[in-house]
Amino acid sequence: MASIISRLVGAFYPTVVAKRDDAIKLGILGAANVAHMSLLTPAKSHPEIVIQAVAARDRKRAEEYAKANGIPEVKGSYQEMLDDKNIDAIYIPLPTSFHYEWVVRCVKAGKHVLVEKPCVSNAHEAENLFNLPELSQPSAPIVLEAFHTLFYPSWQYFLSFVNPEEIEHIHSQSMLPWYFTSKDGIIFDYNLSGGAMICMGTYNFAAIRQLFRAEPVDCLSCETQTFPGEGREKCDIAFKAKFRFPNGATAETESTVRGSSIWFPSSVTVTNKEVIIPDKSLPTGQEKVLKRELTLYGFLNGIVWHRIDIKDKYTIRSSGKVVKTWEEKKSHKAYTFKEAGGKFADFPGEDTWISYRHMLEQFVNKVKGRETQIWVSGEDSIGHMRMIDMAYEKSGLGIRPTRKYE
């Protein structure tokens, strides 16, 4: 218990390190609360990131935000931030409907971008964004969709146990208790690209795509629950979706942002196809069959708690009849890449690094032109938005709208 408390204290109250002279100066668009966990906290322990400025629609709010978080500068507008040549990179935690516009503006201004997930509102925007001519130029700006969960050691370790060709079925689930979201919040505003699928479900979709290392062929079904009332009928508060993948395997996923009062950890379970295991000790006519199930509990909040369970069910059969069955189970964890070992042993990180800190490490490396061990590419982001669109279209709610701007 003491080690858990020590790890969490170090994670959420990290030691502030000295900043290097060549540190990346980063500006925040919007005085968003989410930035405390996603950027401000992890930046404290990174010597090559300085949170230099913040801009918000309400300047007074931006000033209060800057004072509370030790941010040196307040900009009068988002555009003023982009016009500042001393700002190297921009973090965008704005409502999803504003992501496309401001990522594009940042790229055209030559700024590197860390944008909250989902990076845009739909696949059309994603395709336009990641095919901007500015991104194919030498020394092009870096754009990273902030899928922090994919950078955490336990997730990468879990991936290493999974062979996509062996997958038969995947099930993933996540939830937020009802008191985490307001009925009047932006998550239920269609015009701001709200909805459970694009908010929480996006993590589930990303997990499924990475496990299959492939894109879904079709969304077979998508059931949703919505709030009654004008303006919210197109925003789901909960969903259940089923997808088919190229190898014939399927994936089911569910999430809610108005869940029960008791929080349950997220999970993703991979069920493999049955395989015959050669065993020369068996009598003629008998065969040994393995059915493997792999589960990662806590894939969204690995720093708090997680566990990887690998359950192997063995069956001895003779002429199609079951002779004997038994199960073997192993559990694993990885709060650091060193703990995961193997190919991960030399990856950077401490047990006090939250997923956002791991992501920030890779973002800085990419901006600095160094090697990155983990990344979310533009093609990944496009594929991800296509999967979300596929589900929204199947549900009948329709894809999230594109916001026009001048």
Image: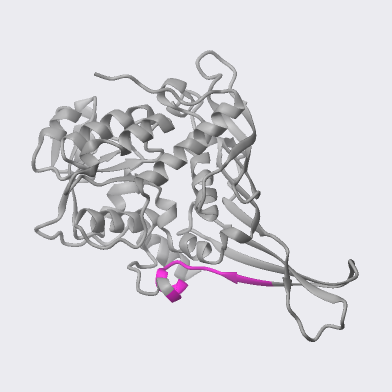
Residue 112 higher or lower than 286, as above or below: above
Extreme residue toward the top, this view: 230
Judging depth in this view, the residue of 59 and 223 nearest the camera is: 223
Residue 27, percent from left and from top? 20, 41
Residue at (46, 22) in percent of width and height: 190
Residue 107, percent from left and from top? 21, 37
The quarter of the picture where the C terminus appears is top left
* Number of dots carrying numbers: 0
* Colour scheme in use: one colour
Residue 390 higher or lower than 339, as above or below: above
Judging depth in this view, the residue of 353 and 221 nearest the camera is: 221
Which of the 4 quarters of the picture holds residue 8? bottom left
Residue 136 higher or lower than 123, as above or below: below
Residue 104, percent from left and from top? 25, 32
Residue at (51, 61) in percent of width and height: 159
Judging depth in this view, the residue of 381 and 190 nearest the camera is: 381
The answer, for residue 196, to whether it is visible in the render is no
Judging depth in this view, the residue of 310 and 315 nearest the camera is: 315
Q: Is residue 295 left or right of residue 376?
A: right
The answer, for residue 384, to whether it is visible in the render is yes
Residue at (59, 18) in percent of width and height: 228
Q: Is residue 390 left or right of residue 320?
A: left
Residue at (37, 50) in percent of width and height: 376
* 337 within the magenta span: yes
Q: Which stretch appears magenta?
A: 329-342
Residue 87, percent from left and from top? 13, 42
Q: Is residue 135 left or right of residue 234?
A: left
* 214 within the magenta span: no
